Image (tube, helix red, strand yellow):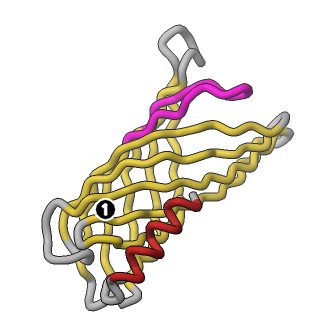
């Protein structure tokens, strides 16, 4: 994480005209949990609106973005409650469009999901995605996307594969 911040700061130092992208995403996710509910696994659906995560993106080059993400959730099922905090970092490459504020992009990254439920646990996730930035004026953009992620089994949780449809808004500082 420190390396990403350092690289972003160096990139911003050389290109003062590049914006910082601040955003919030909502999501509809479908997960296939390994080995739960039979040999093939079990499906889980979740909705996270209006905010599944927040993000900050830095542009060290014209078509390259380094992005930091953070998410927090609480689930309560009567006698059982779960608190989850997730931090991640990703790199995105702008495939089409003029500058950082519009066009198609592809991304890939890693996240650590820290969960408290019958003990504390950390589960690692890697993922890829594709999205589009549609300008909504000078500093705003609508940002729909699709991601697929693989969470690896941890001490307390089985692995899973998740497909998410994202709907986000971005604010650009410049």
- Asked whether 85 or 49 is in front, the reply is 85
- Residue 51 visible in rendering: no
- Position in image of residue 51 (x %, y %): 53, 65
Q: On the rendered structure, is 11 left or right of 125? A: left
Residue shown at 29%/64% (left/top)? 64
| In the depicted structure, whether residue 115 falls above or below residue 41 | below
User: Would you name the residue on which mark 1 appears?
Assistant: 144
x and y percent of residue 14 in the render? 35, 82
**Residue 94 in the figure: left or right of residue 96:** right
Residue projecting furthest to the top = 39
Task: Mark yes or no: residue 54 visible.
Answer: yes
Q: Quadrant of the N terminus?
A: bottom right
Q: Which stretch appears magenta?
A: 148-162
Hey, which quadrant is residue 145 in on the image?
Answer: bottom left
The image quarter in which residue 104 lies:
bottom left
Compared with 114, 37 (above or below) is: above
Residue at 37%, 51% in the rendered image = 165
Query: Does the magenta-highlighted stretch encompass residue 149?
Result: yes
Q: What SS does tag 1 mark?
A: strand
- On screen, 125 above or below 15? above
Q: Residue at x 40, y 46 (%)?
A: 164
Check disc 1: other Cα within 10 Å, few if <14, some if 14-19, many if 20+.
some
Q: Residue at x 41, y 88 (%)?
A: 173
Q: Position of residue 15 (x, y in %)?
A: 32, 83
Left or right: residue 150 versus residue 167 is right
In the picture, the quarter occupied by the C terminus is bottom left
């Amino acid at each position: 994480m420190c390396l990403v911040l350092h690289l972003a700061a160096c990139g911003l130092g050389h290109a003062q005209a590049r914006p910082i992208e601040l955003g919030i995403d909502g999501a509809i996710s479908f997960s296939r949990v390994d080995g739960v509910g039979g040999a093939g696994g079990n499906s889980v659906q979740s909705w996270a609106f209006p905010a599944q995560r927040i993000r900050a993106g830095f542009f060290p080059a014209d078509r390259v973005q380094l992005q930091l993400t953070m998410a927090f959730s609480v689930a309560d099922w009567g006698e059982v409650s779960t608190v989850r905090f997730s931090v991640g970092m990703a790199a995105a490459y702008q495939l089409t469009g003029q500058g950082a504020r519009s066009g198609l992009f592809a991304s890939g990254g890693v996240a650590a999901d820290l969960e408290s439920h019958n003990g504390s646990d950390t589960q690692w996730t890697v993922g890829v995605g594709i999205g589009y930035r549609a300008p909504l004026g000078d500093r705003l953009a609508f940002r729909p996307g699709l991601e697929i992620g693989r969470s690896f089994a941890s001490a307390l949780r089985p692995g899973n594969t998740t497909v998410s449809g994202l709907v986000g808004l971005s604010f650009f500082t410049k």
